[in-house]
Image (cartoon, grey):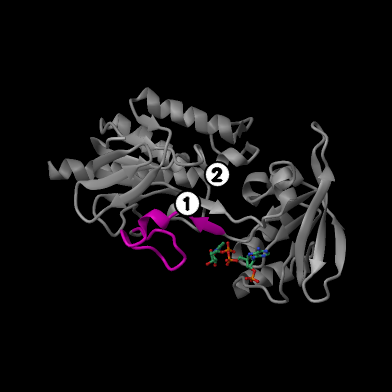
Amino acid sequence: MPEIFEKTKCLIIGSGPAGYTAAIYAARADMKPVLYQGIQPGGQLTITTEIENFPGYPNGISGIEMMEDLKKQAERFGADIRWGSVVKVDFSKRPFVIHTDDNKIIHADSVIIATGASAKWLGIPSENKFSGYGVSACAVCDGFFYKGKVVAVVGGGDTAAEEATYLSKLCKKVYLVHRRDELRASKAMQNKVLNTANIEVIWNNLPQEIVGTEEEFTKAVTGIILKNTKTGKESKLDIDGVFIAIGHNPNSELFVGQIELHDNGYIKTEPGSTKTSVEGVFAAGDIQDYYYRQAITAAGSGCMAAIEAERLLSSEK
Ligand code: NDP
């Protein structure tokens, strides 16, 4: 298939709240942005159940619906939203050169990276089966559904400690299941966990299976099978939900060697800005934020990226 050459003022990579918000702002600024949605159109929010903490939705909204609305809003102002992925970028000179999986070579005056991060999963089949029905990777998003209930958090890092602490304020009991006998989390977070009455750490244990009822309308988690990593002994813990908090992977492979990344793989941006180490390339949302990781903060940084891109191009006219 012959390659097709195109040119755009603003190319946006990724379709979560950061990418779509950037598209809304860039389109309204007459930059005629082109957005590639990537392999998971709508991003991480499309795999959560209900979003109840995004301002403006008093009754909550499903992640899929919200992403569809954001997409339509961007299209209303002329954003060119495309199904497909970027497969290669060259940021060595401007215009930047972007290769896509639909055989296009796009010359872009500015690029906004909003490829997000993906939660790591344990990789056991039952995790997938109960995803959204008692298995979650975000306590702030889904914790509310477990008010007064018993839950488990899997992991031993800062995210797990933070999720457990957050859930302890909502839930009757929180088990923190960790595969070793020592937490990786910072001392301050460890102290919080160990000094919270309704958090119990289950050391040296790894989940083997998540169990529950599987009927269509009553699908729910009821327990988790654990295996002691020292003794090999299996046990069952009765719980209503499980939060997997074993880390996230930033979707930054495409940009290795092109822009500066932190040691943990997230893109470096200037403090208080979405500017990356390459002038004209901006990063918004979870790909550059491993602290807040919320839809609303991602949307806010998407807006910042579009404004910064527009101001840069205007200043160069
Ligand atoms: P981490 O990589 O720090 O921790 C992951 C945890 O999950 C580890 O305890 C690890 O166990 C465990 N784990 C990994 N894979 C598996 C598996 N397959 N089965 C069972 N357990 C597993 O990730 P985090 O998301 O916690 O943190 C990422 C970064 O973000 C860190 O730098 C952290 O400090 C930072 N962060 C900071 C926060 C803050 O400052 N408020 C909040 C959240 C994150 P093991 O220890 O045995 O390797």
* Residue situated in front as seen by the camera: 252 or 61: 252
Judge from the rendering whether residue 284 lies leftward or rightward of residue 242; answer left or right.
left
Q: Is residue 263 magenta?
A: yes
Residue 130 seen: no
Q: Is residue 258 magenta?
A: yes
**What secondary structure is found at the residue carrying circle 1?**
helix
* Residue situated in front as seen by the camera: 12 or 230: 230
Ligand 1 positioned in quadrant? bottom right
Dot 1 or dot 2, earlier in sequence: 2
Label 2 beta carbon less than 8 Å to ligand 1: no
**Residue 176 circle label:** none
The percent position of residue 232, horizontal first and vertical second, equals: 83, 71
Q: How many marks?
A: 2
Magenta-colored span: 248-269
Q: Are marks 1 and 2 in contact (CB under 8 Å)?
A: yes
Q: Which of the two discs, 1 and 2, sits closer to the camera?
A: 2
Q: Which residue is mark 2?
A: 44
Circle 1 residues within 10 Å: few <14, some 14–19, many ≥20: many
**Picture residue at 66% right of the left edge, 71% below the top:** 190
**Picture residue at 42% right of the left edge, 37% below the top:** 84
**Picture residue at 42% right of the left edge, 27% below the top:** 73
154 over 84 or under it: above or below: below
- Amino acid on which the number 2 mark rests in the picture: Gln
Q: Which residue is mark 1?
A: 286
**Picture residue at 63% right of the left edge, 69% below the top:** 189
Judge from the rendering whether residue 242 lies leftward or rightward of residue 260; answer left or right.
right
**What secondary structure is found at the residue carrying circle 2?**
helix
